[in-house]
Image (cartoon, helix red, strand yellow):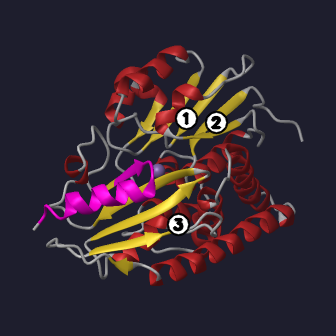
Amino acid sequence: MKFKNSNSCIIAHGDLDGIISAAVLVINLNIPVTKRNIIYTQPFELDKIIISDWIKKIYVTDIAVNNREPEMTKRFIDMYREEIVLWIDHHIGYSLLEEWLGEDKVIAGDSPSCPQLMKDNGFIVPEEWLAAANAADRPTDYPETDLSRFLNKALKAVILKNGSNEIEKYFVMENIVLYLVKSYRGKDASMEKQVIERYGKMYDEFMKNTEEAVKRIKDLELKCKYKVGYLRLEKGEGSIDLTRLFIEAYKIYDIVIVQRYNIEEEVTIISTKLKEIDLVKLFDLVSGASFRVTLKGSHKEILEIIKERLERLR
Ligand SMILES: [Mn+2]
């Protein structure tokens, strides 16, 4: 099969919504699914991607204006203004895209997902893909589907996996796009399906590890008005889903401390469910989220500091 658009490239957000919208572009514009033609990234890493000289058309999908540094997104637009054909986005700040790029080149709006926006603007979007993208990006409004669960498990597994790198993430994302596109075209997608299943099983394993880890959380019994849970993860333990762990731990604790290793580095993550606590302030940090901070350094020393700070909260 000859591709009309081998000089086109898609830049997609590396989450399920972004990946499905890349597949929508592929089937509508007949763009090849190769590493050169589809780039998966994050809004804050847009300035790090490399686009080959022979790319003449760029399609961007599900990439928000970088909220910490909008100028970075602007610079990217200025650099590739000629090549950018279309930018599809549904995140807050999309009006800046229209301002910088011109309304002709932007499909944007408040929408549950990018495939939804594309469908509303005349693209062919299979119903199953649309439902999966909506469920992935707006889980509170749209129920999970078999497809969203199947694909998201693989995606989460490769992200959670200890020591997984960009190449492996790309591998899974590319397999998801190929799986969708080949299935849509009625071609054999069993190889891709196998890859997705393999990572799905890995995710099930990580969930089991997470459940086990939740049971090991201990009460620190501090002289503090909050209930503080503590967990230490040893080197070489299986991967866990920290977000999931915190959700479970919040059923008992207000604040949860997890000490673990990042390769050899000792890291401590402190997380709270209470809005009244600002962890950034409490630990004199310059930035971060008020509800979750990561501290580096000796576990023992950091834990002493944390205890001392938390005990100020009587
Ligand atoms: Mn999205």
Q: Residue at x 50, y 74 (%)?
A: 144
Amino acid at the residue labelled 1? Val
On screen, residue 276 versus residue 216, left or right, reads: left
Disc 3 and disc 1: Cα gap in Å? 21 Å
Residue 106 picture location, percent across and down: 45, 32
**Which residue is the site of mark 2?**
10
Which residue does the image show at 75% across and 26% down from the upper left? 7
Disc 1 Cβ-to-ligand 1 distance below 8 Å = no
Q: Nearer the viewer, residue 201 or 122?
A: 201
The secondary structure type at the circle numbered 3 is helix
Q: Are marks 2 and 3 in contact (CB under 8 Å)?
A: no
Is the C-beta separation of discs 3 and 1 under 8 Å? Answer: no
Residue sitting at the far left: 314
Judge left or right: residue 108 versus residue 82: left
Number of the front mark, 3 or 1: 1
Residue 101 coordinates in the image, percent (x, y): 43, 22
Whether residue 112 appears in this view of the structure is: no
Q: Residue at x 42, y 57 (%)?
A: 268
- Which residue bears the numbered disc 3? 131
User: In the image, which residues are magenta?
Assistant: 293-313
Which residue position is annotated with label 1?
Answer: 60
Q: Quadrant of residue 190?
A: bottom right
Rendered residue at 29%/55% (across/down): 305
Looking at the rendered structure, the kind of residue marked 2 is Ile
Spatial CA distance of label 1 from label 2 is 6 Å
Amino acid type for the residue under numbered disc 3: Ala
Q: Secondary structure at mark 1?
A: strand
